[in-house]
């Protein structure tokens, strides 16, 4: 049982009408300087008098000045967080959970497959990889959105696409006039991805059905199951493996995840209700 | 297994010695709780200063049924379990974990809350409850509130001299004889009590009392009592690899059948001594200057348990019942190295429609294996 630390909103960006990004710093400057996280981990953000929500950390892990969170307005807590302005205070617990397998990336081709706002947990990974671009092989960024208007950070994707050895593939289930990319499910894009399957590693984030479909397509293309990683979401209230809500079969997603290798969760995902 | 005689060197305490034991505990600063009838069931409640333990309490239990009766022999511990025992004292049904204050400038100050539990000696704790407490301690490892509450308890266990029809601790290996986790343990015999210490503080209390070693015949009588209680149990969990059997039967049609009867009321999880799910919520004061962060018991049968923005992981009773049973009897092994069921039978007695988890488990694995 941990107690929140006071955090201050440094700045706030409205990404879309329903999505915003907060950059936070712990009020205790020494604690902020010491704060470290691994890409894929999350914090519990506590809105005063309202409640808490688990939110992925999307900032660059090497940026020790701030902790970034991109948040979709979904309910009471995220509505309260959306009302915060620079200088406002909130509670922060974390970081929690296990992040992406950063140690296993060296020299491999890496795929980042996301759907919807699933991009937030992997954005910090992409930042991290871009700073160490030479350490890995090809980088394929696959992002699917429901509607063309939902794409966040469009300029960012375009910038990433210009980096040598990097392929950016975008899809929208519903396209639009200004949508030059694929229209259809994100899994369609896996066939267009250029990588060496036998040594590739994939990181996935987004709706479970999308991740399952993407995992199956990647397995068909020859990616080894233990090198497929998923970031899972469940109801989380304590974030310390105690409250029981986030259980996925034998796992406490908050503590044992949220990032899992495919073989650890495939059997549970195959059953509706876990 | 003759663990009673083999495990402990009992001292003999005449029946009148029980009052001396209560007095010795009080002298050492412990408030004392024992069995009382409350709301038509047995409860462990703090005794008024000077009050003695009740005699003759007994309860008849069956699926969906709990009725107070009288023990014809007027014993102190002829009852089995009430709906609750130790769990509410170590994992409070509702408790504030921390408090946050907001000053005029909007600064937030987060402060821990000490639960301040009373020093309480519980008399009459059963083997199933001790096993459940050990499981709760594993789950709440490093939780300061659980630790504070646990430290404040002095546990006087008792070997069950009687099994309810809902009891099946023999098949889970957790009873009827308390093995570990107590300060003192008792066996009630016609001529008095056998008592042994399980901790240094338990031994210190016994040193205050005029006790002599129990005879070989009394040790043998204690072992016979355990055997008789074990033999009285008619329910059991399926033998063999129950975890494997359940995990192989996640799509079994029995889950849908049991869901037709299950009301998803959560009684089973409320009375289960190992269930640990809890919700956390913030409760601001009316002035909006402070807010307490409270955890309170929750149930995997509740609609909101699997709620995740925009969808529910377990929208139907079938998946919620399956979650509960598969967690309790299968995935608990992966989490804590053993089953999460201690055979107390509370979920059977307190289920308003009398669903019996031993029966559900047997149907699921028997038919799956066939």
Image (spheres, coloured by chain):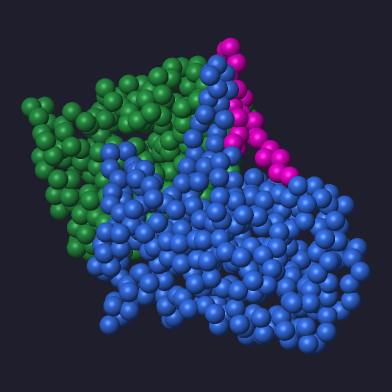
Q: Is residue B346 a member of the stretch shown in magenta?
A: no
- Residue at left 52%, top 78%? B233
Residue at the limit of the structure toward the top, as seen here? B104
Residue B118 seen from this side: yes
Figure quadrant of the N terminus of chain B: bottom right
Of the pair B55 and A54, the residue shown nearer to us: B55
What is the drawing colour of chain B?
blue
| A5 relative to A250 in the view: left or right | right
Of the pair B40 and B103, the residue shown nearer to us: B40
Q: Is residue A28 above or below residue A265?
A: above
- Residue at left 64%, top 50%? B89
Total number of numbered labels?
0
- Residue at left 57%, top 80%? B230
Of the pair B189 and B146, the residue shown nearer to us: B189
Of the pair A192 and A270, the residue shown nearer to us: A270
Q: Which of the 4 image quarters holds residue A55?
A: top left
What is the drawing colour of chain A?
green
Q: Which of the 4 image quarters holds residue A130?
A: top left
Picture coordinates of residue A99 (x, y %)?
Answer: 44, 48
Figure quadrant of the C terminus of chain B: bottom left
| A41 relative to A121 in the view: left or right | right
Q: Which residues fall within the magenta stretch?
A: B96-118
Picture coordinates of residue B4 (x, y %)?
Answer: 70, 80
Q: Is residue B204 above or below residue A44?
A: below
Q: Is residue B108 a member of the stretch shown in magenta?
A: yes
Residue A8 seen from this side: no
């Amino acid at each position: 049982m941990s107690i929140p630390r006071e955090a201050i909103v440094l700045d706030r960006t409205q990404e879309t009408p329903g999505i915003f990004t907060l950059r936070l710093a712990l009020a205790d400057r020494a604690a902020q300087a010491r704060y470290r996280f691994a890409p894929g981990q999350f914090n519990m953000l506590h809105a005063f008098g309202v409640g808490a929500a688990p939110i992925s950390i999307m900032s660059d892990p090497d940026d020790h000045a701030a902790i970034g969170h991109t948040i979709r307005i979904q309910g009471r807590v995220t509505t309260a967080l959306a009302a915060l302005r620079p200088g406002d205070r909130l509670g922060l617990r974390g970081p929690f959970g296990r992040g992406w397998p950063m140690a296993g990336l060296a020299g491999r081709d890496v795929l980042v497959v996301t759907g919807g706002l699933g991009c937030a947990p992997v954005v910090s990974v992409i930042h991290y990889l871009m700073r160490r671009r030479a350490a890995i092989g090809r980088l394929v960024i696959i992002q699917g959105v429901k509607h063309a208007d939902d794409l966040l950070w469009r300029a960012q994707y375009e910038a990433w696409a210009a980096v040598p050895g990097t392929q950016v593939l975008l899809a929208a289930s519903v396209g639009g006039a200004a949508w030059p990319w694929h229209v259809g499910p994100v899994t369609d894009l896996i066939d267009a991805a250029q990588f060496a399957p036998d040594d590739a590693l994939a990181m996935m984030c987004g709706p479970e059905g999308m991740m399952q479909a993407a995992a199956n397509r990647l397995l068909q293309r020859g990616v080894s199951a233990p090198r497929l990683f998923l970031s899972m979401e469940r109801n989380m209230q304590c974030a310390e493996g105690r409250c029981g809500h986030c259980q996925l079969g034998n796992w406490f997603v908050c503590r044992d995840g949220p990032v899992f290798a495919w073989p650890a969760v495939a059997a549970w995902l195959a059953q509706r209700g876990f | 297994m003759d663990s009673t005689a083999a495990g402990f060197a009992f001292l003999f305490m005449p029946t009148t010695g029980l009052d001396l034991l209560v007095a010795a505990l009080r002298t050492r600063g412990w408030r004392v709780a024992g069995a009382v009838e409350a709301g038509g069931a047995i409860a462990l409640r703090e005794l008024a200063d000077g009050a003695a333990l009740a005699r003759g309490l007994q309860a008849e239990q069956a699926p969906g049924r709990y009725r107070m009766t009288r023990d014809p022999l007027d014993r102190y511990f002829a009852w089995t379990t009430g709906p609750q025992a130790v769990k509410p004292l170590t994992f409070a049904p509702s408790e504030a974990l921390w408090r946050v204050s907001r000053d005029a400038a909007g600064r937030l100050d987060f402060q821990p809350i000490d639960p301040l539990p009373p020093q309480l000696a519980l008399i009459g704790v059963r083997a199933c409850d001790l096993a459940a407490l050990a499981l709760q301690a594993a789950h709440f490892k490093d939780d300061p509130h659980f630790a504070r509450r646990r430290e404040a308890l002095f546990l006087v266990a008792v070997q069950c001299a009687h099994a309810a029809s809902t009891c099946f601790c023999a098949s889970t290996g957790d009873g009827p004889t308390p093995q570990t986790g107590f300060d003192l343990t008792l066996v009630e015999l016609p001529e008095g009590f056998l008592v042994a210490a399980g901790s240094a503080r338990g031994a210190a209390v016994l040193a205050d009392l005029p006790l002599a070693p129990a005879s070989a015949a009394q040790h043998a009588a204690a072992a016979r009592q355990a055997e008789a209680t074990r033999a009285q149990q008619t329910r059991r969990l399926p033998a063999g690899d129950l975890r494997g059997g359940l995990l192989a039967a996640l799509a079994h049609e029995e889950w849908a059948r049991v869901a037709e009867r299950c009301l998803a009321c959560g009684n089973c999880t409320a009375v289960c001594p190992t269930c640990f799910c809890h919700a956390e919520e913030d409760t601001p004061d009316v002035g909006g200057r402070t807010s307490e962060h409270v955890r309170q018991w929750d149930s995997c049968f509740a609609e909101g348990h699997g709620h995740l923005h925009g969808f529910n992981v377990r929208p139907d009773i079938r998946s919620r019942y399956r979650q509960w049973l598969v967690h309790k009897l299968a995935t608990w092994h992966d989490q804590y190295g053993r089953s999460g069921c201690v055979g107390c039978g509370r979920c059977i007695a307190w289920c308003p429609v009398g669903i019996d988890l031993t029966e559900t488990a047997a149907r699921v694995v028997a038919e799956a294996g066939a």
